[in-house]
Each structure stands twice: as C-alpha cells, then as structure tokens.
Amino acid sequence: MRALAIPFLLLLFLTGKVLAQSVDLVSYRELPDPKPVDKTSWSTIKAGPHFSFTTADVRYGKHTTPDPSGVQASWKANAWKGEKVHTQALLWSTSAMPQVTLSWSELKNDKGSIIPASQVSARFIRFVMTDGLNPEGNNCDKRPVGKYDSSLVADPIDFVSVRDVPQQTAQPVWLSVAVPATATTGSYAGTLTATSPSISKPIVLSYSIDVQHRTLPTPTDWTFHLDLWQNPYSVARVHGVKVWSREHMDLMRPYMKMLADAGQKSITATIINDPWQSQTEDVYGSMVNWTKKKDGTWAYDYTIFDQWVRYMMDLGIDKFINCYSMIPWNLKFSYYDEATQRDTFLIAKTGTPEYEAHWRPMLTDFARHLKQKGWFDKTTIAMDERPMKAMQQALALIKGVDKNFRVSLAGNYHPELAPDLINYSVATNQTIDAPTRQRRQQAGFTTTYYTCCVERNPNTFTFSPPAEATFISWYAANKGYDGYLRWAYNCWVKDPLLDSRFRTWAAGDTYIVYPGPRTSIRFERLIEGIQDYEKIRILRNEFAAKGQINKARQLEKALSHFDIATLTSRSAADVLNPAKVLLNSL
C-alpha cells in the first residue's frame, strides 16, 4: 500500500490499542443502568435465588423483576435432526450471587441414545446501551446523546463461564442445543444447573427436546442467500492490531467462521478506497492498490484482495465475491500517481470520458486476473442504492469490457435493470412481481431483500423485539425471495460491547455480533429464521412430490401472515409462534 494508506493504517492501529486498553474484551464492566432499580417491585420478591426458563421473545431488563406469568419450571422444544434450537432462562435474586457458574448435562432418550453435552451451551447474556425508534418515522437520522430515550438492553451472549450477579438484578441466560444430524428420533431429556457459593444447593432446571424424523441440511447446503457485509477493518481497530497482519487474520477467523456457520454466501470485497464516504467508525480501505505509472498506463496490485478472498473461501463462503464499488457515494477514486509521487484522487461521474478512462483499464485487467484465479464466475461488480441512470451507464461500461461480467445491486427495484443483475436485493418497500422472480430463478439469478435504518420493523436493532430477526426469513419465504441482505455484520461503533448507539441510525444498525467474538440474541434468532426457511423449502417440495395438498395449504396460509403490514397490529412473536408450532407438526 502507498503513502495514502499508511497514516490511515497507523490510525487504525493506534485507536485499536486505545480501545483494547480501555475495554477488556474478555472481562468488562457494563455501563451504569440509566433506569433506577424499582425497589418496590423487588420488595415483593421472595428471598433467595430464583432460576427459571422464560421465553426467547423478551429482552429482560437488568434491574426489572420478571413477570411471574412469563417464567416456567421446564422447557420443551421440537427439532429436526441437524437443527439448533434455543431458549432463554432467567436468574434473579434480592441478594447478591457471586461467582455464578452454569453447567449442563448431556441429553438422553429412553432408548439410551444421547445428545452429547458438547452440543449444548449455556451462556450469560450481557447488557449494552441502546436508544429507540424515531417517533416521527425514519431512523436514519442524526442521534446526539440524549435525543432518544436510552436504556440498557439484553443482547450480547458472553463466553465467560463464571459471573457475579449483584443484588436486585435479573441475569438472563441463553441455552442452545445443536441436535446432531445423526441423532435418532425420539424425546431427549437434559438439565441446566446454576451454582454459586451463596446458594446452599445447585438449582437444576429440566428440559426436553423431541427430535423429529426429518433432517436439516448443513449450513453449507442451505439455499437461503444470506449476505451480511463484513468489515475487516473494524476487527483490526477493536483488537488493536495492524490490518492484514498475520495476527489480524488469525483474530478474524472465529468471527468469519461464525458467519459461515450461519449460511453466509457472499464475500464483501472493496476495490476502491472508502466506497461509503466514511460513514462508519472504521473506513473501508481498498483491497486493490491502484497505481498510475509515469507513461500513463495503470498497474493493479491484487495481493490483499486475493488474500481476503482465499481466506473467506477456505471458510466455506464462496458463492459470490461482491466487489464495491464502481459508483461510490462521493464518486471519488483514489490512486497513487508515479509522476507526482503522491497519492491523489479523481472525482468523475458515470457516463463521462474521465470515468470511462479510469475504469476501463481496471475492469480489463481485473477480468484477466479473476479468470486466472478461477473466480470470474463468482465475482460481481457490486453497487448499492444507486440511481437507475448511473447504473445503466456503469452496466454499459462493464459489459463493454466483458459481456460475461456479473453485476449486483442492493437498492430500489427497476425492471429495466433486472435482466442484467445476477444478484439483486431490494428494499422492503419495493415489489418485484412473481413472473420476474420466477424468470430470475430459472436463469440462476438471486433475488433478495434488505433492511437498514429505514425500516421500523422487522429489524435487528439492539432494541428490536427478538422475534423480528426470525420473522425476516419467514417474510422472505412468503414473498418468494431467495434470502436476505443486511449491510453490517460487524461495523462496530466506538465501544461496541458497552454502547450500541451511533451518531446516525438506530442503535445496533451497524452490527449484529460483538467483539470477542460474541454472538447475540439478534444473530441467534436470525439463524433460527434461516433454519425455518430451509424447513419450509423442504416441506414445500415434499408436499408437492407426495400430492399432500391439504398440508401445503396449511403451510401457505400460515406464511400469508408474514407481511410487513401485519406488524402494525400484531407483534412478530404473535405471528411467529403459532406458525412455528404448525411447521413442526406437519
């Protein structure tokens, strides 16, 4: 990388060190709760520790007493073989419980078969600061501290095995069971246990899982097209390491493996510097180094691009390499000029001679390189939220270089563009007619939808009801979409473990997993919905093959309720839960 990149990388390194020193990424203290403890409600709680199963649909307040109607002594779930199921438990007490430790058993059925304890995990859920919806509608607004009501919200799922629970505190716990694909059909029973030096004897919760006869494919074989955009630069800053160093690559692996295990299909690659006009805490650099030589010709260094793509493919993320962007929001293109020996930039609009002179040589050389690597058919020149005229001008240039170049867009729906976009993601307020979707599917094209700060619901803000993350995939199944796109997997804010608020956009809009790596309620519920989407697909095919018209009708009727308009009068959980009961009974 040239001189332009060096100060930026140094800044990344230094700011990462500051964060790593100020916030312990393993053991950290949450921000104070702005909501005072309701001593009156806690005075009604019976003395001693309490531990019960609850529901995964509720984010429990840190210092709020639980609703007695929402707690239960046991939990029972249905699962396909190969499916991961989960629920939430809650631990609370009027007095402090130091060094609480969670443990769990294997699950056994009455025939001696087991689900090993290694397939089970129970983790403490932590609290992060959040804000709320803009009461006037659009959530893509400037958000100075204090503009909206702020509170601590349960979302990050921690990996520490021991945690102190202060007095008058509700501590949620996330229980997850990954049913092996080799499990035999039947009912399995297990236990979840909490211990503490302050507890006279362990508190044991019992639960059971009915494993059904059907099998869910592994995530690599899921058809659902998940596209969560990755930000390698955020990982470098938060961990305080040099970007693209060996340490950086090693630190990223568990984050990207977690994404691959969710069924991720696309690699987010940047072929220019700062394609999104520095809108995030960590600016995306270019994975391609552009050099204009003294004789006016161009040279391109793909070292980082190749390293990143191979790295992600080795993890199993290999359907698309989405390269951003030929149409950045500020139309600014950086490069190193050998004649002046400095970094500089060009500002050029699509359709102009300057734009074509800048991009045609690069596209020609990029096509050559991709073909040499065997990646040409997986690569898309990707844009997002760009006007139709600009897209048409860029398409003409791209196809003029190589008619087989593939192009993708996340933005408004334009019928004129649909035949040229192999990967098209549209906003929830857009409508693609069924014949167009079917033609695209027959051509092997991918059609998805996305949410961002605009959508009030369903969404994956840190304050969003958890069931909305699952609703997202059911909506895709109902509307005939191939999957879902979200612009930010890990575009972390300054202190993502402590405060999910951002200077613009609703809290949590910029990321769905936490440093550590830590998963979240939002991410786990999103995966749940993707599993449901695959189950729906399998059942649709099965019912069609067997001529089971009545079952097919029941399924489609349940799916018909998954519409955005439904959420104006019903919660996502109210729509989702009966549909899931039906899905597991067909």
Image (cartoon, rainbow, N blue to C red):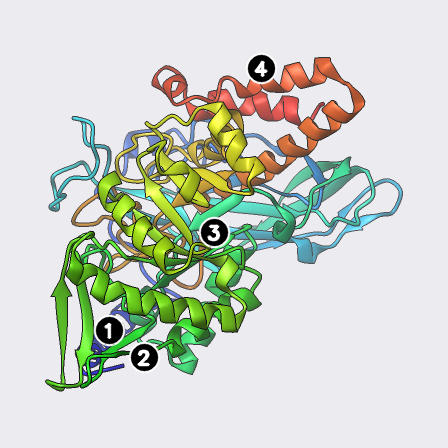
Q: Quadrant of residue 34?
A: top left
Q: Earlier in the sequence, mark 2 or mark 3?
A: 3
Residue at horizontal 42%, vertical 80%?
Answer: 247
- Where is residue 388? Give x, y as percent: 26, 39
Q: Amino acid at mark 2?
A: Lys
Q: Quadrant of the N terminus?
A: bottom left
Residue at horizontal 18%, vertical 57%?
Answer: 277
Q: Which residue is mark 1?
A: 12
Q: Which residue is mark 4?
A: 557
- Where is residue 36? Give x, y as percent: 23, 39
- Mark closer to the observer (2, 3): 2
The numbered mark at residue 322 is none
Q: Is residue 205 left or right of residue 259?
A: right
Residue at horizontal 17%, vertical 56%?
Answer: 331
524 to 398, vertically: above or below: above
Q: Earlier in the sequence, mark 4 or mark 1?
A: 1
Mark yes or no: residue 390 visible: yes
Q: Which residue is mark 2?
A: 242
Tag 4 near tag 1, CB within 8 Å:
no
The numbered mark at residue 124 is 3
Q: Amino acid at mark 4?
A: Lys
Tag 1 near tag 2, CB within 8 Å:
yes
Residue at horizontal 38%, vertical 28%?
Answer: 44
